């Protein structure tokens, strides 16, 4: 039975998917409040570096930060501005109006000055925080000379190198302001980052007087003589004379030049996080969206701005499935640029193909040379992991694809022989979605072998030097260690908790009992009616169905599972062995798990009383799903085959979607229902008409009858069952074996675990 109120249990709010105009404003106010909080001042962030420097300014300027710095140095705030006005992507200076209007609403915590594009914390920071910052200051006053470039707006004047004299207790933007001929940094505007140097390279220019007349205006007015040469460098309009300088306050700016850098920084997990190969807006994505990451990457490498368009990916069989809409990116000038995220890929020739995450571009110019490092080369227990050791009792609660995991971890740089160990990164609670590529693959590989409560200790060879430098606050010491010693990384990881995949969480919240349990009960009912003694589960995964069947009294004596995932089979073996070895009242006499594809023939899977394939075929390509149907009914030939798959039409209810045209008759089963698939790993989801057509034609070809049913919802009410089921029944027993002798002996599956009740033992190969 469907429980609409269950959305509240999931924490699902329709407004979260379709935000109102006020919601980004509220988020912007919340973000600005945090940026000027006592807590943020102590964080490692490009903007906090500016804040600490402005506290050394004198008089009324103490703690006063240029609004332009706020707009360009905080990615989250910038993204919120882009939601309010998408044109901010092409013209970042539009964000100034949002920053100043937000500050004007925070009169209790920040102060804005009329005639200046600047923001200042209203109440002073506590003395203990200031003292903590003072400890990090140098005892002696030092000057730093920085080479920069002066670019006049007049084409009659030449571009000239300049030197910026920056005091150790000063604010570098004040030095730039002097070169631009303005009184202080509050009148300086910053461009987006340009180039691919390791530190920040930006253009700085004086804000026109017209921009400072009304700081709360809907649009900050930037007018003046256009600097054509400076505008060319950064791809946005620059007015008046400009200073191009590469300078900043944190080594973390280095990693932002790498394709996945923005994402890693936003997760504060540089040595653990990864840019996911699949983009989902619910649980596993943090930081800039793929669109912003690609735009930033193209700008940093001096590529032309990407052009975004939505296209239809061609399918092999258009007659039996909808076209999948994916985001594709075409890059108009630089033909050697490619970007892939999820199943969409953007290339110069506009092809769309299946691909993993990939960035490739033609580099122009040379970046800063990083120190060469020496890495320990230790024998591996897996392709990327060294000396893996897992400690703790097995709780039996293991992660699976799309589970939400919460872990604590630490990463340390250690020298050969473990003589020196320096902590680089740690996180007490880090949450991500399993199987989406949100963490580095070696870490995810280790976690698949763990259960909740266990801890793992392992080593890895060193990643690129940029990651190590970006993760440490002591770059000078780390560089010295890397260049003088042979090093590796030591990881310590504890699996804190595992939350079920979103599809299962939704089922449990919206249906009572959950759909997964209803499917098991449906299978059990057919087992009892048919008096089946043997069962094969095609695509058994982690053995959830086989495990559940052991909780019901049935006539089954032999159960078999087959799957292509060795990790899933390993978990299934662990679960089944534990239950079968301790359960004395079971009718099961033998159990076997096979590693193999359900589209490959193996005579050991033939002739079972009942076969099940529950919520599996949608994870295959459609042609593979059709192939499985033919092999199952023509060669494996179970007396009964139960196949279930999601009903795409029911997604309207699950996702609170509506028909594209509000006036369209909901009884007309068209392809205009624009819903997402329930799982990002689903290759297709069929409507009732498509599923019925596939099953009917399949049954007719192989002398089976077929009946249709389902669980969740009702057949008598639209849009039918949430999970649709086809039950194939063999009409007559075959009079002769039409399988060739070679096929009859084919063994394409590998036994990974088997159990029998004679000596109540198991064996694994």
Image: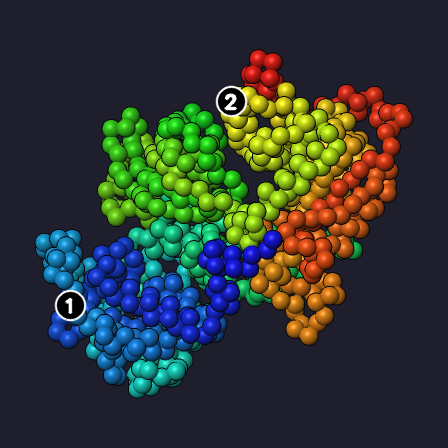
Specify few, some or many for label 1: CA neighbours under 10 Å numbering under 14, 14-19, or 20 or more.
few
Q: Nearer the viewer, residue 687 or 196?
A: 687
* Residue 751 in sight here: no
Query: Between 211 and 530, which is closer to the camera in this rendering?
Result: 530
Q: Where residue 657 sits in the image (x, y, percent)?
A: 60, 64
Residue at 21% in and 78% down = 183
Dot label at residue 443: none
Are the two marked residues, 2 and 1, in contact with CB atoms closer than 8 angstroms?
no
The local crowd at label 2, few if under 14, some if 14 to 19, many if 20 or more residues have their Cα within 10 Å, is few
Q: CA distance from mark 2 to mark 1?
A: 66 Å
Which residue shows up at 37% across the image and 28% down it?
391
- Give the image quarter of residue 132: bottom left
Kindly indicate the quadrant of the structure image that contains residue 211.
Answer: bottom left
* Residue 102 in view in this figure: yes
Q: Identify the secondary structure beneath mark 1.
A: loop
- In the image, residue 571 sits, relative to residue 662, either above or below, namely above
Residue 297 position, x and y percent, is 46, 58
Quadrant containing the C terminus in the rendered view: top right
Across the whole image, how many numbered discs are drawn on residues?
2
Q: Is residue 54 above or below residue 42?
A: below
Q: Residue furthest top?
A: 759
Horizontal relation, residue 2 to residue 407: left or right: right
Query: In the image, 520: left or right of 192?
Result: right
Q: Which residue is mark 1?
A: 124
- Decide if residue 451 is on the left or right side of residue 215: right
Q: Secondary structure at mark 2?
A: helix
First reached walking from the N terminus: tag 2 or tag 1: 1
Q: Residue at x 55, y 54 (%)?
A: 510
Find disc 2 in the rendering and name its residue.
582
Comparing 44 with 633, the one in front is 633
């Amino acid at each position: 039975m469907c429980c609409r109120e269950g959305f509240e249990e999931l924490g699902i709010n329709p407004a979260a998917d379709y935000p109102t105009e006020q919601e980004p404003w509220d988020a912007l106010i919340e973000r600005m409040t945090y940026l000027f909080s006592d807590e943020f001042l102590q964080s490692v962030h490009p903007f906090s570096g500016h804040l600490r420097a402005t506290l050394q300014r004198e008089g009324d300027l103490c703690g006063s930060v240029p609004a332009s710095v706020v707009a360009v140095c905080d990615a989250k705030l910038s993204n919120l501005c882009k939601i309010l006005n998408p044109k901010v992507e092409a013209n970042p200076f539009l964000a100034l109006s949002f920053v100043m209007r937000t500050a004007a609403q925070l009169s209790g915590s920040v102060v804005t000055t009329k005639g200046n594009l600047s923001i200042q914390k209203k109440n002073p920071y506590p003395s203990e925080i200031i003292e903590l910052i003072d400890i990090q200051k140098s005892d002696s006053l030092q000057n730093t000379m920085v080479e920069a470039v002066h670019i006049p707006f007049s084409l009659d004047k030449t571009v000239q190198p300049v030197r910026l004299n920056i005091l150790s207790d000063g604010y570098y933007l004040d030095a730039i302001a002097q070169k631009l001929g303005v009184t202080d940094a509050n009148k300086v505007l910053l461009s987006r980052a340009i180039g691919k140097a390791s530190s920040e390279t930006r253009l700085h220019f004086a804000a026109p007087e017209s921009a400072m007349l009304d700081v709360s205006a809907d649009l900050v007015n930037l007018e003046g003589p256009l600097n054509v040469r400076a505008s060319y460098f950064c791809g946005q309009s620059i007015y008046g004379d400009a200073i191009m300088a590469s300078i900043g306050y944190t080594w973390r700016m280095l990693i932002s030049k790498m394709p996945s850098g923005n994402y890693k920084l936003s997760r504060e997990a540089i040595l653990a996080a990864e840019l996911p190969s699949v983009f989902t807006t619910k649980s596993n994505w943090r930081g800039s969206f793929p669109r912003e990451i690609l735009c930033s990457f193209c700008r940093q490498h001096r590529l032309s701005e990407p052009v975004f368009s939505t296209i239809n990916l061609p399918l092999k069989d258009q007659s039996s499935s909808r076209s999948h809409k994916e985001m594709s990116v075409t890059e108009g000038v630089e033909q050697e640029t490619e970007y892939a995220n999820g199943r969409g890929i953007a290339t110069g020739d506009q092809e769309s193909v299946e691909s993993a995450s990939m960035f490739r571009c033609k580099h122009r110019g040379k970046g800063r040379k990083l120190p060469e490092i020496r890495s320990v080369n230790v024998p591996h227990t897996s392709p990327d992991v060294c000396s893996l050791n897992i400690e703790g009792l097995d709780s039996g609660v293991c992660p699976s694809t799309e589970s939400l995991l919460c872990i604590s971890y630490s990463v340390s740089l250690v020298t050969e022989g473990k003589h020196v160990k320096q902590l680089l990164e740690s996180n007490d609670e880090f949450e991500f979605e399993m199987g989406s590529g949100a963490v580095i693959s070696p870490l995810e590989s280790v976690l698949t072998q763990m259960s909740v409560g266990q801890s793992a200790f392992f080593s890895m060879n060193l990643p690129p030097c940029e990651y190590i430098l970006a993760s440490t606050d002591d770059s000078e010491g780390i560089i010295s260690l890397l260049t003088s010693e042979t090093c590796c990384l030591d990881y310590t990881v504890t699996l804190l908790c595992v939350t079920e995949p979103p599809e299962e969480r939704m089922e449990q919240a919206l249906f009572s009992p959950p759909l997964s349990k209803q499917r098991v009960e449906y299978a059990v009912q057919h087992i009892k009616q048919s008096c089946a003694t043997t069962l094969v589960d095609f695509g058994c995964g982690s053995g959830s169905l086989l495990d559940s069947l052991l909780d019901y009294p049935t006539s089954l004596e032999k159960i078999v599972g087959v799957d292509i995932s060795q990790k899933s089979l390993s978990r299934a073996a662990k679960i089944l062995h534990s239950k079968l070895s301790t359960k004395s009242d079971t009718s099961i006499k033998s159990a076997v798990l096979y590693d193999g594809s359900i589209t490959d023939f193996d005579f050991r899977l033939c002739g079972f009383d009942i076969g099940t394939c529950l919520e599996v075929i949608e994870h295959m390509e459609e042609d593979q799903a059709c192939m499985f149907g033919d092999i199952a009914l023509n060669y494996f030939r179970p007396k009964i085959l139960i196949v279930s798959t999601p009903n795409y039409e029911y997604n309207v209810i699950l996702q609170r979607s509506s028909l594209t045209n509000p006036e369209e008759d909901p009884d007309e089963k068209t392809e205009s229902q624009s819903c997402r698939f329930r799982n990002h790993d689903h290759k297709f989801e069929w409507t009732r008409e498509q599923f019925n057509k596939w099953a009917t034609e399949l049954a007719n070809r192989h002398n089976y009858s077929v009946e249709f049913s389902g669980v969740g919802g009702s057949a008598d009410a639209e849009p039918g069952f949430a999970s649709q089921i086809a039950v194939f029944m063999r009409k007559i027993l075959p009079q002769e074996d039409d399988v060739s002798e070679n096929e009859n002996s084919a063994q394409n599956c590998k036994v990974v675990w088997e159990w029998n009740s004679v000596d109540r033992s198991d064996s694994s190969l």
